[in-house]
Image (spheres, rainbow, N blue to C red):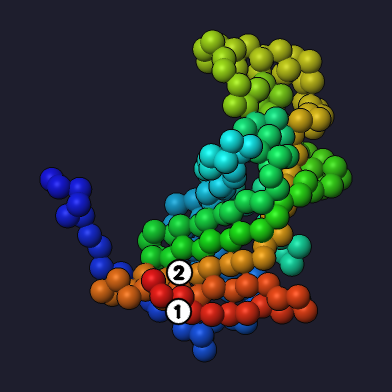
Amino acid sequence: MNIADLRKSYEKAELSESASHADPLKQFDQWLTEAIHSEVPEPNAMTLATVGSDLRPSTRVVLIKGYDAQGIVWYTNYASRKGQELAGNPFAALQFHWVELERVVRIEGVVEKVSAEESDEYFRSRPLDSRIGAWASPQSEVIESRTVLVANAAKYGAQFLLNPPRPPHWGGYRLKPDNWQFWQGRKSRLHDRLRYTAQSDGSWLRERLAP
């Protein structure tokens, strides 16, 4: 098998200016809802790209936990690599790829922490194991073995029992979009690609980009 010979013809749908929303948030809501109803694997998974002080980009997959006119929300360890990079450079990019629907959404903007109250509320909604895990994992740090995680989980489980508080190093981020792109695969690689750019008056400029 030659990997260069792997190809797919995209023919499931189209994306036109007349059939898309003028507000990118409404377009995103429509596509995410369709992805959920289509039962694609993990429709809430998104790739988060950040850039460190060394100007090297890094990516990882996180899960969207909320979205509205204020932005896109996810939760993580503030001391992780992504947390450290966002502390130094608050600009980031997100990408959703719904393979089965032949769709991609790209979102760029500035990132800020959500309020402590929002983080507390979401943390309380998590399963107990996940709440303990937030204490047990020194995310992005080198550890000797998995035994470290297991031992930490046992220690914090015994310490907090059924009511672990939110760790001070754990909470939410919100990306406030200033640029959206919606990509719909089309036949012959003539894909549909619409970009929305935030304007100073609060409106959005919608433009078609060549694929």
Q: Is residue 130 left or right of residue 100?
A: right
Q: Is residue 83 left or right of residue 112?
A: left
Marks counted in the figure total 2
Q: Check contact, mark 1 vs mark 2: CB within 8 A.
A: yes
Q: Could you say which disc has been placed on residue 15 in the image?
A: 1
Please tell me in which quadrant of the rendered image residue 117 appears. top right
Q: Given the current orientation, which residue lies at the most extreme left position?
A: 1
For badge 1, the amino acid type reads Leu
Q: Given the current orientation, which residue lies at the most extreme bottom position?
A: 18
Where the N terminus falls, by quadrant? top left
Work out whether residue 173 or residue 110 is closer to the camera in this orientation and state it: 110
Where does residue 75 sit, x and y in percent of width and height? 69, 43
Work out whether residue 91 or residue 69 is closer to the camera in this orientation and state it: 91
Eyeballing the image, is 105 above or below 11? Answer: above
Where the C terminus falls, by quadrant? bottom left
Where does residue 103 sit, x and y in percent of width and height? 43, 65
Residue at 46% x, 63% y is 104
Of the numbered discs 1 and 2, the one sitting upstream in the chain is: 1
User: What kind of element bears circle 2?
Assistant: strand
Residue at 63% x, 72% y is 197
Q: Is residue 199 left or right of residue 164?
A: left
Work out whether residue 193 or residue 168 is closer to the camera in this orientation and state it: 193
Residue at 66% x, 58% y is 109
Mark 2 = which residue? 183
Q: Residues within 10 Å of mark 2 (few under 14, many from 20)?
A: many
For badge 2, the amino acid type reads Trp
Eyeballing the image, is 207 above or below 2? Answer: below
Residue at 59% x, 54% y is 93
Work out whether residue 181 or residue 124 is closer to the camera in this orientation and state it: 181
**Real-space CA distance between mark 1 and mark 2, rounded to the nearest whole angstrom:** 8 Å
